[in-house]
Image (cartoon, coloured by chain):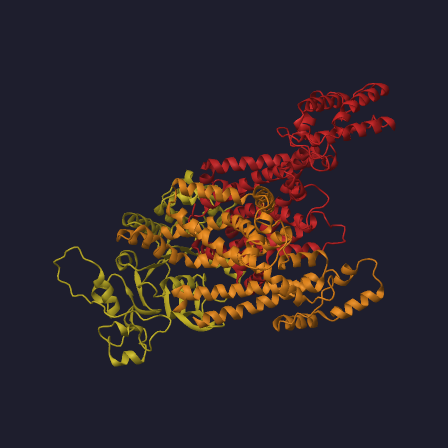
Amino acid sequence: MWTYVVRRLLYNVPVYLGIIALMMAMLRVRNPVMMFLGKSATEEQIADLTERIGLARPFFFQYLEFLGQVFTLNFSQESWQQPGKTVGDLLSDAIVPTLWITVPSLIITAGIAIAVGLVSAFFRGRALDKSLVLVATLGMCISYLVYIIFGQYFGAYKLNDALAGEGPFDGKLFAIESWEPGFPGNWIHFCLLPVIINVVVAMGYDTRFYRAVMVEESTRDYITTAKAKGASKRKVMFVHMLKNAMIPIITRVMTTLPFLFVGSVLLESYFNIPGMGRELLTAINELDFPVTQTFTAVFAALFIVTNVLTDVLYALVDPRVRLS
Amino acid sequence: MSLIRVDNMVKHFPVRGGVLNRIVGKVHAVNGVSFRIDEGEVLGVVGESGCGKSTLGKLIIRLIESTSGEVHYDGTEITHLGHNDMLPFRRRMQIVFQDPYSSLNPRLTVNALLKEAIVFHSIVPPSEVESHIDKLMAKVGLRPDQKNRFPHEFSGGQRQRIGIARALALNPDFIVADEPVSALDVSIQAQVLNLMMDLKDELGLTLLFISHDLKVIEHFCDRVLVMYLGYVVEEMNCLDIHGEARHPYTQALLGANPVNDPDEDRELTVLEGDVPSPFSPPKGCPFVTRCPLVESRCHEEMPPLVEKTKGHRVACWAVE
Amino acid sequence: MILKALRSRGARKFRQNRLAMFALGVISVYGVVALLVALGGIRLEETFERVSRNSIPGAWGSQTSEKRVNDAEEYLEEIESALDNEEHLEYRFAERKLVDLPVEELVERVEESWEIWDELADVSNVDEHPELLVKLDEVEERIDALFAPLEGVDGWMYAFRTYLGTDRQGRSITVRAVYSIKLAIQVGFIVALAATLLGTLLGAAAGFFGGWIDGLVIWLYSTFSAIPVLIMLMVLVTIFIDTPYEGTLVPLYVSMMLTFWIGPCRVIRGEVLKLKELEYVQAATSIGFGRFYILVKHLIPNTSHLMFINFSLLFIGAIKNEVILTFLNLGVKNQPSWGTMINQSRQEVINGFFWQIGAATALMFGLVWAFNIVSDALQDSFDPKHVS
């Protein structure tokens, strides 16, 4: 098994190197200094900024230096848009709110979707299954944004009007925007609504997928054997189907992480939550080169780490890999 | 001079593994096989799964490239020819496959499939292509008006006939039949085999007939090669096979065929032991793990394929 | 190749799926509408044209009295000013012009309307006073009488324009929503086609030839897919800032094409890897066809069902991502699209006005749903292992 894990690690390293190279190249297609300073920049300003960020040096040097910074977690570059704050500062500030939204979303979505998928697969073809699939399909056809807009409208505005000023936060259960740390009170107030929206959106896709996985398992001969031996429905579902479906389930849970990122950018922008997604979006819109470069590298790193973790989990869960 | 001459054909497939996906070993599929086929002859190749017979068939017509060894076709050495030089030979050497369900392109009608090959080699002038196809269909026992159907609209036996038609479309001299009836129901097997026999006589074809079923080989072939784990262990003519087979493996194969009379007293050689893996074959004769006649010498050295009597070669230390 | 595919067993199974055929019909309707719009059915200027007051609800909606009073005031002020400046002949809302009467007559009518309106001016809650509601109705009728009645085609056209109401700038929601169909079909089609073709070529080559080509393609798509799609799109779009292409569809095309090709590439590569071991490919080799010929004539056509499936999925992806990118200020800026409509509706929703977001969402829903059904049905019909 360890050969397998080592092999996956070794495989992912050149991929990450490639991503960083690709990303750095993309960001330098247009001169970032010129773009940021705009048309009114003086020669002096341009030269100064180029010098500071080291943009005049050959690409290969910049590449190596940046890689070094990422691997040693050195984020002392200064943001262009917010001078005085380093990228590292922005990163550490922004990570907390993002985690507060993405981690609960991941857990809740996975939990509900797997359960619903299991139920749906078990009652395959019957009314319950058909209606669940129908709802999931319909839900997938509406833009994420629409869910956010209506979620905010009903969950924050309308609900607040209905509760009308009693209790903490002036009776507003869900905040219309912004964020403050704290659990559980602040979390429920600021984060729960975005989390709910994220869960609802992801539900359509995930449920259909898990259902398909379960159905595929349920058609296998060993399930028929189990039933023939007299195993109870519950045992068949949980002990047999679920266990063997773990591999695709794990893959899926891991691969939905990028989707969470999409959600985080949108949710954070809309609800004005100062998380990584919003920071990156601001940086891109404001042409803040150091922040964009580093944040993207961090996101990609998270992605790669997730991939390797998935492979390791595979190795643990799939006896075929574990014993090879 | 023989139509086909095979000299020392060797094929090893690399196996990858380990951390860096390097080559960690080889599967010894075919080990130094040599033989000839005369014009008009039907040579059978028999053996169990994994003995290398299919690989051998494909090596001869260069569907797979050999690791070493040579094939001579009608006097010309074809193993190292380039793509364009190989084309006229390809026309003359065709193959019929085992699986009727994957040997025909599901997207092409029978007509399209045959036309493609015929036009590519300019077998007949363009105006005669359609009638040539009709004749081919008739020859394999299909109705020409079915030629615009897709493969999935035919039964397994019919598909195999289409495969035969494709092999015949280029007017070849030599056909490799790779277990052509193994995937068919028994009643259909007989039909297709009879068809092939008639065609062989009518067109004067030379065949290499690969099968795991010795009964079919006996019925159909002039001579037979018995293969085990990539080696040819015996080569003889089929007429004498029941009386004259010398190699213990051949005898076991003969005995393994059920006979109609349950009371008939037969001396059976029942093989015990496991087939060694082609990945790490044992030193010496590969049959040592199961051979009833094994001696110490067999573990040391692989016996050479030696001619005992005219046209009969055996590779076994115990047969002296 | 397409005609052959239509006769295959999978195609027949697809045709028997009535829901899928219906969805295909829906898509065709959208396609026809897009074509009509593109051919001049709705010109771009029309989507920016004011057709009525701002934030008017659609045909079956209602407004608050407060808004009606405000709207009436605005009408009267505008008409008065137009008459003063002798611009009354140019004053119009699309087909709706002022009635053909001498100026003095019109001025008089406006005065009369003002008198009635004044009684409503400072009242805080008109709804509580039934007699004032009657006056409000009267003011509105009088204002209506200031405009020429619409007949025939003009009447139909104007009804169409106002059917779903207006946005906060008085522009016709219906016109914008229908125009957006053209945009959606355009973006969806071009992106899906380009990405599918690119992905198929790369995937097929990688799967078939193996070796360094395979290594390169795998490395390419592993790398590309390691950056979340949205970041890639965002960064790629920013490359076009301050170029003449900014805010047009070109950044969208380029960025989506460079990120979407991965899906088809993976799938086609996997399929080709499977197919190239099949005996009919070996048969083609034994006949003597060259490798390139086998790849293009034998293998790729046998992956066509996957190409169609990926095409539909990418079409949906393109439409949805356009909406998201526009929301993030990185999308279309010079034309209406469902993304711009949804984006602009944010403020409206807070005030309880759902017409713009409703129209955009409903039309988008129809198209996306249809493609979802079609891609499901395609998978059902062509992939024997697919779970339905």
Chain that is orange in the image: A
Between residue A88 and residue B15, name the one nearer to us.
A88
Q: Residue at x 45, y 44 (%)?
A: C380
Residue B76 visible, this orientation: no
- Quadrant in which the C terminus of chain A appears: bottom left
| A50 is higher (above) or lower (below) than C284 | below
- Quadrant in which the N terminus of chain A appears: bottom left
| B220 is higher (above) or lower (below) than A75 | above
- Colour seen for chain C: red
Question: Is residue B269 toward the left or the right of residue C223 in the image?
Answer: left
Between residue B65 and residue C343, name the one nearer to us.
C343
Question: Is residue B70 toward the left or the right of residue A187 in the image?
Answer: left
What is the x, y in percent for residue A101? 56, 56
What is the x, y in percent for residue C297? 53, 50
- Colour seen for chain B: yellow
Residue C335 visible, this orientation: yes
